[in-house]
Image (cartoon, helix red, strand yellow):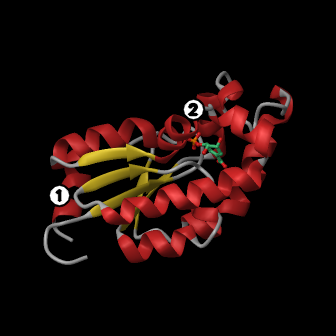
Amino acid sequence: MAGNSKRIYLIGFMGSGKTSLVKKLANKLGYEWRDIDADIESATEMDIPTIFSEHGEDYFRKLEAQFLRTTGLEENMVVSCGGGTPCFEGNMLWMNENGITIYLEMTPKAIYSRIKDQRETRPLLQKIPEDKLLDHITEMLEQRLPFYEQSQLTISGLTYKLPELVETIKSR
Ligand code: S3P
């Protein structure tokens, strides 16, 4: 992207820390931030589990792709995507053409321990019993990796250093 104006897309599996990093990063860069899931929830006045249960996943994916593309009208912005955003509707390609993509990498075990008690807000995991959850996360992550790995930068979701990340972004 030309000049100092940048759009940054945070991607990664559910529970990898996108929601917390988006605010910290925007604050350090002096950018605005957005969260695709939160935008969808406020526009539809429905929470994500309700959208999935009443309208289905395909409907959600269409909304997700539409809301993602509205970020193309903004500059100097950090965007937190949903865990599945890069994997549907050509979204990964679109993000790479319209901004800097950053993958928050985390092992299935770390993801498991972070999300095992927060499944009710995540329709894709709600019905998975706890003893099958780690295997399920491992499988889903394997399917999603080919998309996540197309990101321009990869950082560890557990041990990234915010000042280093800010410098890397500024130098691009
Ligand atoms: C999803 C992740 C969720 C949300 C929806 C689907 C996914 O976002 O978009 O439940 O497909 O991985 P988080 O990654 O913020 O939990």
In the displayed structure image, the side of residue 138 where residue 73 appears, left or right: left
The residue closer to the viewer here, 40 or 100, is 40
Q: Give the mark count.
A: 2
Q: Position of residue 140 (x, y in %)?
A: 74, 53
The residue at the point 55 percent across, 48 percent down is: 82
The residue closer to the viewer here, 53 or 31, is 53
Of marks 1 and 2, the one in the foreground:
2
The residue at the point 61 percent across, 38 percent down is: 111
**Residue type of the residue flagged with mark 1:** Glu
In the displayed structure image, the side of residue 49 where residue 64 appears, left or right: left
Q: Which residue is mark 2?
A: 45
Label 1 secondary element: helix
**Residue type of the residue flagged with mark 2:** Glu
Mark carried by residue 167:
1
Q: Position of residue 170 (x, y in %)?
A: 16, 62
Quarter of the rendering occupied by the C terminus: bottom left
In the displayed structure image, the side of residue 149 where residue 73 appears, left or right: left
The residue at the point 24 percent across, 61 percent down is: 75
Relative to 122, residue 77 above or below:
below
Location of residue 14 by image quarter: top right
Q: Residues within 10 Å of mark 1 (few under 14, many from 20)?
A: few
The residue at the point 66 percent across, 56 percent down is: 61
Q: Position of residue 113 (x, y in %)?
A: 63, 29
**Marks 1 and 2, how far apart at CA:** 38 Å
The residue closer to the viewer here, 164 or 9, is 9
* Residue found at the far top of this picture: 117
Q: Quadrant of ligand 1?
A: top right
Q: Position of residue 133 (x, y in %)?
A: 79, 35
Quarter of the rendering occupied by the N terminus: bottom left
Does mark 1's beta carbon lie closer than 8 Å to ligand 1? no
